[in-house]
Image (cartoon, rainbow, N blue to C red):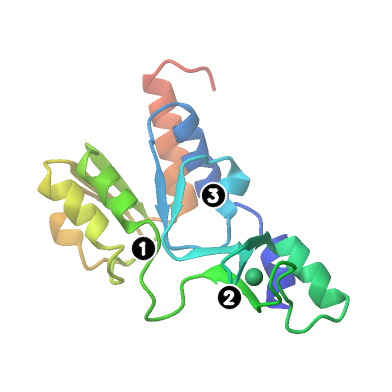
């Protein structure tokens, strides 16, 4: 049931706004802890998924990966647990489990260190190492903009804090940026 919920989830206005800002060249990359693949579904291209993705499964024996659709077909046809075609190993979602190191953190860190600004959207910034990202940006002299409904652990380093729903904030921000770039809306 959790799997099927995953496949009907749709990107929200914030996901779409982020994707459009990437198309406009404003956003260079998305670094996310989400495993739902909704940034890509909204059109984001350069997405670093620190906690992996539920859209893909990986063989615990040989490391071969499979699209989740393929694995769901295996489960539906009665193969429980779903097995690797290559080596017969068990397939699991390609996500980071509690206590495992996050994926691609070096890449995320590198991006943060050369960014002149980071937009933190919908995070309490209490989970490390992801919460280091805005700290890296700040340390290199960049700006930190935090959009979250509640105060966060890193409000003290923020240059701008917007306490608002992500969808509302990002819709307005996108409109303002397009306006300043002279893009017809
Ligand atoms: Zn395998």
Q: Quadrant of residue 28?
A: top left
Q: Are marks 3 and 2 in contact (CB under 8 Å)?
A: no
The local secondary structure at tag 3 comes to helix
Q: Is mark 2 within 8 Å of ligand 1?
A: yes
The local secondary structure at tag 1 comes to loop
In the foreground, 85 or 132: 85
Q: Give residue 27's position: percent from left, percent from top.
A: 39, 36
Q: Disc 1 and disc 2: Cα gap in Å?
A: 34 Å
Q: Which mark is residue 64?
A: none
Which residue is the extreme one toward the front? Answer: 87
Label 3 vs 2, first from the N-terminus: 3
In the foreground, 155 or 91: 91
- Crowd around label 3: few <14 · some 14–19 · many ≥20 (10 Å): many
Q: Is mark 3 within 8 Å of ligand 1?
A: no
As drawn, is 113 to the left or to the right of 170?
left
Residue at coordinates 46% horizontally, 78% vertically from top-left?
97
As drawn, is 11 to the left or to the right of 151?
right
Q: Foreground mark, 3 or 2?
A: 2
- Read off the residue under disc 2: 61
Q: Which mark is residue 39?
A: 3
Residue at coordinates 88% horizontally, 76% vertically from top-left?
77
Q: Give residue 159's position: percent from left, percent from top.
A: 17, 47
Residue at coordinates 32% horizontally, 58% vertically from top-left?
105
- Crowd around label 2: few <14 · some 14–19 · many ≥20 (10 Å): few
Q: Is residue 68 visible?
A: yes
Q: Disc 3 and disc 2: Cα gap in Å?
A: 29 Å
In the foreground, 165 or 38: 38
As drawn, is 157 to the left or to the right of 40?
left
Q: Foreground mark, 1 or 2?
A: 2
Q: Is mark 1 within 8 Å of ligand 1?
A: no
């Amino acid at each position: 049931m959790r799997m099927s919920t995953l496949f009907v989830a749709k990107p929200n206005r914030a996901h779409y706004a982020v994707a459009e800002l990437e198309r406009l060249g404003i956003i260079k990359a998305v670094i996310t802890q989400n495993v739902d693949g909704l940034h890509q579904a909204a059109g984001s291209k350069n997405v670093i998924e620190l906690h992996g993705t539920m859209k893909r499964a990986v063989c615990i024996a040989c490391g071969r990966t499979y699209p989740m659709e393929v694995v769901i077909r295996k489960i539906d046809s009665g193969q429980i647990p779903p097995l690797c075609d290559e080596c017969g190993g068990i397939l699991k979602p390609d996500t980071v489990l509690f206590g495992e190191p996050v994926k691609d953190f070096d890449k995320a860190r590198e991006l943060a260190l050369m960014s002149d600004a980071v937009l933190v959207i919908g995070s309490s910034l209490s989970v490390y190492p992801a919460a280091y990202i805005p700290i890296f940006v700040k340390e290199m002299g960049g700006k930190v903009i935090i959009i979250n409904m509640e105060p966060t652990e890193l409000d003290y380093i923020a240059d701008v804090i917007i306490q608002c729903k992500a969808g509302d904030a990002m819709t307005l921000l996108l409109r303002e940026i397009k306006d300043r770039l002279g893009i017809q809306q």
